[in-house]
Image (tube, helix red, strand yellow):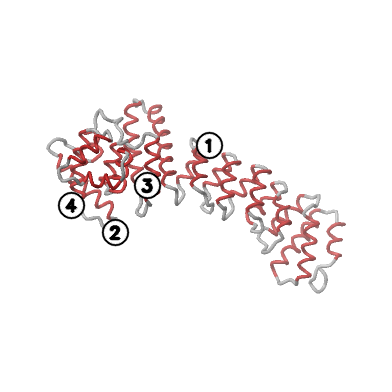
């Protein structure tokens, strides 16, 4: 730096001629830091950038590391300098890849395709990762990289990318655990996660607790269905609901009991859409049939959907209760509504079953029909 604070050719010469990497790194740090400490003229900035363009090819790793660390958050850093440092060895590239906003999505995707796992992991941990970059990481990254991406709430991840990750790493707890704890997931992805975790739990129950596969399956199905219904939130769009029910149907998970559970939760949309899928008719026609005053419409509809007779009676009772109750959608109303429906259904059946909860009642009524499906 010259006496008046500007950069001079002597600065470049000193950096090139000083053989001590420590001394050059110190000088680099001072020059780079000065750009953020005060306002530079256009000419001074160009001089500094000229120095940086020389130093990005410095033979000493320490010099390049210092440059990358110092410039990682520099506003308006020229993209060519940022990209050169970001494409260097991992020790040099990591600060730039993790923090620099001078790198475009195209730059980042090119580096994902051409550089090491360490480079990919740094990109996966950026404060903001676009959907396009996330998709590239899911396509090219290792299990460790994908796990880092799933744990990054700043990563924007499309439903397609989530599905791709589940196809490739669904059995990996390292990947599905951080995915499951994300603040927001597409409902179809959440349903697949519930299934994957349940399958793993079933294996553990059979292996470690001397439980028969049949008993473990019963427990897992009940747990899975309760979890699945719990995923349905206020404001779930009709499109999301249809995709979810199609996915459940295609994978043999659209059971009669999950349809009944949805009804007991007051989720009429799920209930009607599921029956429409099972009977291959419109939701509007389902609505007409279940509201048939003589009750024959519901009976025929359930028969078409292969719902066990015992559950048909329960569905009929639950529907009557749902029609009588008011569901206003206020905070906590869903739980209140569910409890009221279950309480009244249990009261209706109390002479037949000494049941303390709806799970017991469902299991008793549907005994022998566990494999029956709503579709």
Left or right of 26 in this view: 147: left
Residue 231: image location, x then y, percent = 37, 47
Label 2 element class: loop
How many residues crowd around disc 1 within 10 Å: few (fewer than 14), some, or many (20 or more)? some
Residue 334: image location, x then y, percent = 28, 52
How many residues crowd around disc 3 within 10 Å: few (fewer than 14), some, or many (20 or more)? some
The CA span between labels 2 and 4 is 18 Å
Tell me which label, 4 or 3, sits earlier in the chain: 3
Left or right of 140 in this view: 169: left
Which mark's residue is nearer the viewer, 2 or 3?
Answer: 3
Image position of 67 with respect to 189: above or below: below
Tell me which label, 2 or 3, sits earlier in the chain: 3
Which mark's residue is nearer the viewer, 4 or 1?
Answer: 4
How many residues crowd around disc 4 within 10 Å: few (fewer than 14), some, or many (20 or more)? few
The CA span between labels 2 and 3 is 21 Å
Label 3 element class: helix
Which residue is the site of mark 1? 168
Image position of 245 with respect to 155: above or below: above
Which residue is the site of mark 4? 324
The CA span between labels 2 and 1 is 40 Å
Q: Kindly identify the residue that appears in the image at 56 percent across and 48 percent down.
A: 134
Contact? badges 2 and 1 (CB < 8 Å): no
């Amino acid at each position: 730096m010259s006496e008046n604070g500007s950069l001079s050719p002597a600065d470049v010469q000193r950096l090139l001629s000083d053989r001590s990497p420590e001394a050059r790194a110190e000088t680099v740090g001072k020059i780079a830091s000065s750009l953020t400490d005060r306002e530079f003229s256009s000419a001074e900035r160009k001089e500094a950038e000229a120095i940086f363009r020389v130093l990005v090819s410095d033979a000493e790793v320490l010099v390049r590391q210092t440059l990358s660390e110092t410039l990682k958050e520099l506003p308006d850093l020229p993209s060519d300098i940022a990209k050169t440092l970001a494409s260097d060895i991992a020790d040099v590239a990591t600060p730039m890849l993790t923090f620099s906003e001078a790198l475009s999505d195209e730059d980042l995707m090119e580096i994902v395709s051409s550089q090491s796992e360490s480079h990919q992991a740094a990109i996966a941990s950026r404060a903001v990762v676009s959907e396009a970059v996330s998709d590239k990481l899911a396509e090219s990254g290792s299990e460790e990289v994908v796990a880092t991406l799933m744990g990054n709430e700043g990563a924007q991840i499309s439903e397609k990318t989530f599905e791709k990750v589940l196809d490739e790493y669904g059995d990996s707890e390292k990947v599905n655990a951080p995915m499951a704890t994300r603040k927001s997931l597409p409902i179809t992805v959440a349903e697949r996660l519930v299934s994957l975790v349940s399958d793993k739990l079933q294996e553990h129950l059979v292996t470690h607790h001397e439980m028969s596969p049949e008993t473990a399956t019963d427990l897992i199905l009940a747990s899975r269905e309760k979890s699945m219904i719990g995923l349905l939130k206020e404001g779930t769009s009709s499109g999301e609901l249809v995709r979810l029910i199609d996915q459940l149907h295609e994978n043999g998970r659209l059971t009669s009991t999950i349809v009944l559970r949805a009804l007991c939760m007051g989720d009429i949309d799920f209930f009607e859409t599921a029956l429409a899928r099972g009977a291959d008719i419109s939701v509007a026609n389902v609505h007409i049939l279940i509201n048939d005053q003589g009750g024959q419409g519901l009976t025929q509809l359930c028969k078409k959907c292969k719902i066990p007779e015992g559950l048909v009676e329960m569905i009929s009772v639950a529907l009557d209760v749902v029609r009588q109750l008011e569901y206003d959608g206020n905070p906590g109303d869903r739980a209140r509504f569910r409890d009221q429906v279950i309480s009244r259904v249990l009261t209706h059946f109390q002479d037949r079953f000494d049941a303390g909860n709806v799970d017991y009642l469902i299991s008793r009524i549907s005994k022998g029909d566990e494999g029956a499906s709503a579709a």
